[in-house]
Image (cartoon, rainbow, N blue to C red):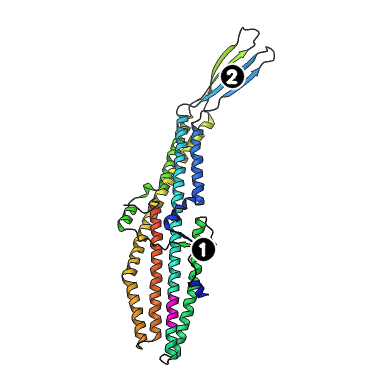
Amino acid sequence: MIAALLLAAPPALTLSLDEALARAREDPAAVVARAEAEVARRRVDVARAPASPVLTLGSTRYSAREEVSVSQEIRWAGERRFGVLSARELARSAAEAAARAELEARRDVRQAWFDLAAAEDAAALAGDTLARAREFRDSVSARFEGGRAPRLDSVRAEAELARASAEALATAEERWGAWAHLAALLALPAREDGGTNAARPPALPAGDVEALAARGPGGHPTVRAAEAAVSAARAARRQALARRWPGLAFTAGVNADDPGLPGPDWFGSVGLTLPFGARTAPIKVTEAEVALEEARLDAARRQVSEALETAYRRVRGAGAQLRAYDDEALPAASEAAQLTREAYGFGRGDIFRVLETERALIDVRRARVAAYRELKRSEADLLAAAGETDAPKD
């Protein structure tokens, strides 16, 4: 079973990071947000449309008179203008919310892709460890059969091989789980094996990291959506204030077939809707809504600022950790394992020291994989907190 695992064919479907990100736009949350933005955009035309005219037809019983009239309500004193402005700002807020949904979808896909990459690297490391354990077991067995090593060494080598085999199986299943998560985000079949294209993008340059951290919250879609919501609430308040004035309605019509008068009788009138009672309450509601949206805007700015600073610090920490593994820990552990194996081969060491240094090397290599994964996840959070869909371009 282990041999089949190591010799398994590569997955039929491989995705680069760019290919995975290109599909992020189809994330269900992003699709719903774009549909909501389209609904809000069409509501602007509804707010811009004038009130529908009222056609009245009637007659009287005794004078045989027929009457036709048309009434038109007029929105004046800025009521219509501020209504349209409020609808436009709500549409802008919805568009920014759609941008935020797509930004979050790209962050999730980016992190899932690097989770899969780390799982693949961990599985490859487990396979390499298994091969080294099998090679070492064969070497110790040969030494034992030749009388140059005790049985304890042979037993320990067999135990180490069994442990490496179990870890190889576990990491293979973890890689399947990481693929299933990415496949779910991209609407791909989770049961059909897939993987990355084996590319491992380097860390973002330090200058790009600093530039992203310096952006501040103002450019984030969450903040822009909240700012548009505040503008919409203020326009709605101005619309409510305009409704304090009497409403106007003009009526024009004609009376026909009046036996007492020759020809049709034209008439016109002006109606006033007096703003008593119910027209004052909406003003207080809109004032409260303005205060609510301003509070939400302040909360959005704080939230984005916190996320930006937190992600920035995580990127710096993970980057320093990865450099320490690459520059110091991994070379030292590799050299120690090689020297210990060579010493055991010449009969100047014991198997316990060999296994100890081998495990130390494996632990460092695993930690390096985990550090790379943490760095790329942190960079994804930093890009999202800065309102960027991708790394800055030169």
Q: Nearer the viewer, mark 1 or mark 2?
A: 1
- Counting residues from the start of the chain, the first of labels 1 and 2 encountered is 2
Q: Residue at x 40, y 85 (%)?
A: 351
Main SS, magenta region, reads: helix
Q: Nearer the viewer, residue 45 or 70?
A: 45
The reply to whether the magenta stretch includes residue 70 is no
Q: Which amino acid type corresponds to the residue marked 2 in the rendered image? A: Ser
Determine which residue is flagged by label 1.
193
Residue 288 position, x and y percent, is 47, 40
In the figure, residue 259 lies in which quadrant?
A: top right
Q: Which numbered tag is attached to residue 257? A: none
Q: Residue furthest left?
A: 207
Q: Residue furthest right?
A: 62
In the figure, residue 138 lies in which quadrant?
A: bottom left
Q: Residue at x 35, y 50 (%)?
A: 216
Vertical arrangement, residue 58 with respect to residue 211, above or below: above
Q: Is residue 341 visible?
A: yes
| Magenta-colored span | 129-137
Q: CA distance from mark 1 to mark 2?
A: 72 Å
Q: Which numbered tag is attached to residue 69? A: 2
Vertical arrangement, residue 2 with respect to residue 248, above or below: below
Residue 298 position, x and y percent, is 40, 47
Vertical arrangement, residue 73 with respect to residue 359, above or below: above
Residue 292 position, x and y percent, is 46, 43
